[in-house]
Image (cartoon, rainbow, N blue to C red):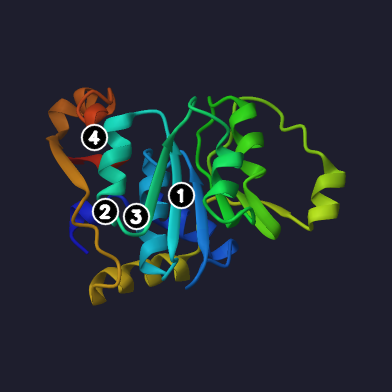
Amino acid sequence: MTFEEAGRLGYIGTSYGALRRAAAGPGQVALIDGITGTLGVASTLLALSSGVSRVLGTGRNEELLKRVRELAPDRIEVMRLGEGSSGEWAKSRTGGEGADFVISALGAKAPVETMLDSMLGVRRGGRVINVGGVGDRLPVDVKWLMDEQVQLIGSNWFSTAQGQEVADMVATGALDLSCLITKSFPLSKVNEAISGRATDCDGGFGNYVVIP
């Protein structure tokens, strides 16, 4: 990996740990809530490299949603949040069954209702992996979890071994990070870098590194 790519390993590894907990693999359908963010983009790239057949993604920025879909137009479908129920949309795109797993990568300020909605897009016996957090407590219908045999799993960070696996995937070409955009800053401009303005327009595709 290049130094710039390795600068993203924290987010990519966190997404990888979530996909491992989701048991992502060939032939599956993924629903990634918050697909245009840093964890969402990383989850998408990793899902594609893991052989997931289809990725359904939700986000708020239409331009970023288009960029995500262009990664694999034959395997990725997107929906803008606010245009309807994400759970119902996922069910409609899977013949009523739902996605095999949901990656909730919304972020700590996201409305809890958004995660609750996407959870309903998972199939019976599926997994819901929370890797982003939401802005409030999650009121879960445990009878629904029981009846549908759905697993709700929290995921945070990744192991050293998993980080090595990600690096090996990049080295062999199994994981292509060429779509990511890195902007480098000298130490004297660290405040400009951490302001976020440098990567705002690129969403989860953008990243910055500070090079002393």
* Label 1 environment density (alpha carbons within 10 Å; few <14, some 14–19, many ≥20): many
* Label 4 environment density (alpha carbons within 10 Å; few <14, some 14–19, many ≥20): some
Q: Nearer the viewer, mark 3 or mark 2?
A: 2
Marks 1 and 2, Cα distance to the nearest angstrom?
13 Å
Q: Secondary structure at mark 3?
A: helix
Q: Secondary structure at mark 4?
A: helix
Q: Nearer the viewer, mark 1 or mark 3?
A: 1
Q: Secondary structure at mark 1?
A: strand
Q: Kindly identify which residue carries mark 3.
A: 9
Q: Which mark is residue 56?
A: 1
**Three-letter amino acid code of the residue under disc 2:** Leu
**Three-letter amino acid code of the residue under disc 4:** Asp
* Label 2 environment density (alpha carbons within 10 Å; few <14, some 14–19, many ≥20): some
Marks 1 and 3, Cα distance to the nearest angstrom?
24 Å
Give the residue displayed 24% in from the left and 34% down from the top. Answer: 202
Question: CB under 8 Å between callouts 1 and 2?
Answer: no
Question: CB under 8 Å between callouts 1 and 4?
Answer: no
Going from N to C along the chain, the mark reached first, 1 or 3, is: 3
The picture places residue 115, in percent across and down from the top left corner, at 61, 36
Question: CB under 8 Å between callouts 1 and 3?
Answer: no
- Viewer-proximal residue among 79 and 11: 79
Marks 3 and 4, Cα distance to the nearest angstrom?
18 Å
Query: In the image, 42: left or right of 20?
Result: left
Q: Quadrant of residue 118?
A: top right
Marks 3 and 2, Cα distance to the nearest angstrom?
20 Å
Give the residue displayed 36% in from the left and 39% down from the top. Answer: 36
